Image: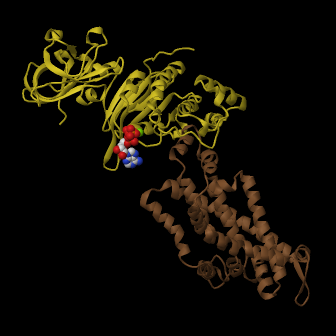
Chain colours: A yellow, B brown
């Protein structure tokens, strides 16, 4: 099967989209482009306007401002059934009065495809999602994961320019979600259709996407590759929302522009690097974020050599999760807990609750942002 | 494990009223009616078992025609009620939200605040020769004499549809309400237009409501006495009127019972055919 790599042609282009419900602005001046064949995720907390944005692209909601273009042509004036996009709904919306086969054939019939062509395409798409034996089943006879794949097949069979997915894994249990995440990404790579995927689960967005847009209260806060979002967040919101972090609030004691000495509200002194736009000056309120895996953990003080920030601590609890294991370390003077990734290399294997340890992290890996007002 | 006796007694007491009701008001009269319909009077106070009453029905064209006419008119009234009630219900269930939804629903209910008799008189006031519609037509110059709009089949039909509306709207609104909006949206999203979405998604979903509404409306119409009598006048030729005449005017209980039984068979047969044609089952309908 041909693997199409994302090209630079814009498939979907949204320009300054606005949607208001009365006084409330659900989508506020959002602009972005999605490259052809890429997997684009929109990540944001519940109620931030993700579904509203997607429904505008699908044509179920009329934007109050801005334009939506597909392959350069504006589609704002087109009704949903004439747009070259299809949507996988939040609760899938499979037609319960039809069989799996009829569900998939529904769109083809509306296009007046011939009977032979319908049969061929339905069989092919069922093959592609790996469920050829389900053709004659009723919808209520399917498992959650099967429904999921049939809903996607029902859209893919129409070969849309863009497939919109509204948290399609939301209703499934964790284990299944983990598996389908990988499958969905593979499927997208195989068929080469552009996917616009909505989720509030950051791990889904990071694993599957070529590009992720982080959305907060109707606005896009940052758009970038998963790596960019994870390693170079531009706002405190992105740093806090994408991945796990230790977070401190504090006030700038001194700064040279890029690095700052910060005294946190619980009395720690730290050296952190400025990220994000507004330059910092003495006395500014800031938030500091440090990833658990950026913290060096050692049994003695030299373990954290070379780190600008160093703290003694006592192991409060061990959260074993295989490669993802964490240690909660309590700082004795302030009582604050710090989450540290537990390296799976021998020397810390025997770590016990109550043991004294030393922590350290580089100034470069402590990012600080002007605190949200 | 057997049920403890006190629980069995409780169940018995709980269901006693409904069992009594069924026995006293439904089964007993019908058994009696069947027995009465199967006898003929040979001499005063002397009866013989015979099918003569049923034979009379089939040999006398008036009875037979009235019977067929009632059935056809009832089916027509049911279909018309459905055609009018469906868009109304769809609008109430799917297009409006919140307060206005409740308001519209109550609006459909208001005609039932007054009795059927008063409602039918309302139509008579509108439709009779000296009535409001006739006056309006005369005044606007559309006709040059007063017209009698009462005492014809159209007037009966209007009255029947009006009386039945609520019994169709309630089950339809209930089933349409349970239709997930995203199914309709998915129907459009995948390329359907209003017609195909209606045909392939909304109507199949609403089918149990359509069936139960139609059954109720059909039964009520078939058994209606007042509306055809008042709006259709003495030529209304409604089968219930024939039954009334046999029982009350002619005092011919034997023939009246036979008619009553035939009406029961007729309504059951038509409902059965309707269910078969629409691919519904009675159990799905009452769910
Ligand atoms: N039809 C509507 N009328 C009024 N307000 C609405 C309407 N639809 C959405 N909203 C509001 O717009 C905001 C964004 O809703 P939206 O459904 O887009 O959120 P979301 O990001 O998809 O959330 P979730 O992850 O919970 O699905 C919410 O605060 C919601 O209350
Ligand atoms: Mg949503």
| Corner quadrant of residue B224 | bottom right
User: In the picture provided, is B82 more to the left or to the right than A163?
Assistant: right
Residue B219 placement (x, y as % from top left): 70, 68
The image position of residue A182, as x and y in percent, is 47, 22
Q: Quadrant of ligand 2?
A: top left
Residue B201 vertical position relative to residue A296 in the rendered view, above or below: below
Position of A253 with respect to B258 (left or right) is left
Q: Position of residue B56 (x, y in %)?
A: 90, 77
Residue B47 in view (yes/no): yes
For the residue pair A12 and B200, the one nearer the viewer reads as B200
Judge from the rendering whether residue B287 lies leftward or rightward of residue A85; answer left or right: right
The residue lying at 14 percent from left, 11 percent from top is A301
Q: Relative to residue B61, is residue B93 depicted above or below?
A: above
Is A338 situated above or below B186? above
Residue B152, percent from left and from top: 73, 77
Image quadrant where residue A313 sits: top left
Q: Which residue shows up at 56% across the image and 65% down it?
A: B10
Q: Please tell me in which quadrant of the rendered image residue A224 appears.
A: top left
């Amino acid at each position: 099967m041909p693997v199409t790599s994302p090209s630079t042609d814009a498939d979907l282009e949204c320009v300054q989209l606005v949607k208001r419900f009365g006084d409330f602005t659900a989508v506020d001046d959002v602009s972005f482009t999605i490259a052809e064949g890429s997997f684009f995720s929109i990540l944001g907390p519940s109620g931030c306007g993700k579904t509203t944005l997607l429904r505008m692209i699908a044509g179920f909601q009329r934007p109050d401002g801005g334009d939506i273009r597909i392959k350069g042509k504006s589609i704002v004036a087109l009704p949903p059934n004439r747009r070259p996009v299809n949507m996988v709904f939040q609760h899938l919306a499979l037609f319960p009065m039809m069989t799996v086969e009829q569900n998939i054939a529904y769109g083809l019939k509306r296009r007046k495809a011939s009977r032979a062509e319908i049969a061929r395409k339905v069989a092919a798409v069922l093959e592609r999602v790996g469920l050829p034996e389900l053709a004659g089943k009723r919808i209520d006879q399917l498992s959650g994961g099967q429904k999921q794949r049939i809903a996607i097949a029902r859209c893919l069979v129409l070969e849309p320019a863009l497939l919109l997915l509204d948290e399609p894994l939301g209703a499934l249990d964790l284990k299944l979600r983990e598996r389908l995440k990988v499958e969905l990404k593979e499927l997208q790579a195989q068929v080469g259709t552009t996917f616009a995927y909505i989720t509030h689960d950051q791990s889904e967005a990071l694993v599957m996407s070529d590009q992720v847009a982080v959305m907060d209260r109707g606005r896009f806060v940052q758009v970038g590759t998963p790596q960019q979002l994870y390693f170079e967040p531009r706002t405190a919101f992105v740093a806090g929302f994408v991945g796990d972090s230790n977070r401190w609030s504090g006030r700038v004691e001194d700064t040279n522009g890029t690095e700052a000495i910060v005294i946190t509200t619980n009395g720690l002194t730290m050296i952190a690097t400025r990220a994000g736009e507004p330059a910092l000056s003495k006395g500014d309120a800031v938030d500091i974020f440090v990833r658990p895996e950026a913290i060096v953990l050692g049994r003695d003080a030299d373990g954290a050599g070379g780190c600008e920030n160093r703290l003694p601590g006592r192991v409060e609890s061990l959260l074993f999760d295989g490669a993802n294991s964490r240690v909660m370390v309590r700082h004795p003077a302030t009582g604050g807990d710090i989450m540290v990734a537990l390296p799976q290399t021998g020397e810390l294997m025997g770590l016990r609750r109550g043991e004294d340890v030393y922590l350290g992290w580089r100034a470069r890996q402590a990012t600080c942002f002007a605190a949200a007002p | 494990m057997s049920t403890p006796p006190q629980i069995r007694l409780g169940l018995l007491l709980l269901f006693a009223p409904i069992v009594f009701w069924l026995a006293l008001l439904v089964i007993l009269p019908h058994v009696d009616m069947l027995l009465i319909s199967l006898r003929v009077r040979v001499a005063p106070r002397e009866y013989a078992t015979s099918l003569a009453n049923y034979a009379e029905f089939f040999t006398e064209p008036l009875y037979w025609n009235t019977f067929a006419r009632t059935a056809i008119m009832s089916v027509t009234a049911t279909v018309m009620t459905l055609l009018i009630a469906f868009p109304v219900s769809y609008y109430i269930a799917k297009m409006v939200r919140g307060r206005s939804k409740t308001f519209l629903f109550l609006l459909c209910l208001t005609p039932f605040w007054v009795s059927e008799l008063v409602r039918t008189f309302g139509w008579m006031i509108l439709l009779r020769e000296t009535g409001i519609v006739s006056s309006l037509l005369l005044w606007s110059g559309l006709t040059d004499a007063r017209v009698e709009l009462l005492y014809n089949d159209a007037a009966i039909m209007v009255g029947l549809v009006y009386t039945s509306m609520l019994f169709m709207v309630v089950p339809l609104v209930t089933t349409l309400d349970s239709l997930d909006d995203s199914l309709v949206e998915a129907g459009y999203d995948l390329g359907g237009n209003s017609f195909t979405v209606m045909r392939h998604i909304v109507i199949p979903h609403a089918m149990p409501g359509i069936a139960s509404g139609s059954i109720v409306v059909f039964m009520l119409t078939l058994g209606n006495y007042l509306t055809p009598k008042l709006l259709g006048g003495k030529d209304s030729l409604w089968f219930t009127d024939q039954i009334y005449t046999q029982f009350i005017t002619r005092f011919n209980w034997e023939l009246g019972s036979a008619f009553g039984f035939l009406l029961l068979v007729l309504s059951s047969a038509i409902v059965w055919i309707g269910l078969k044609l629409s691919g519904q089952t009675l159990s799905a309908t009452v769910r």
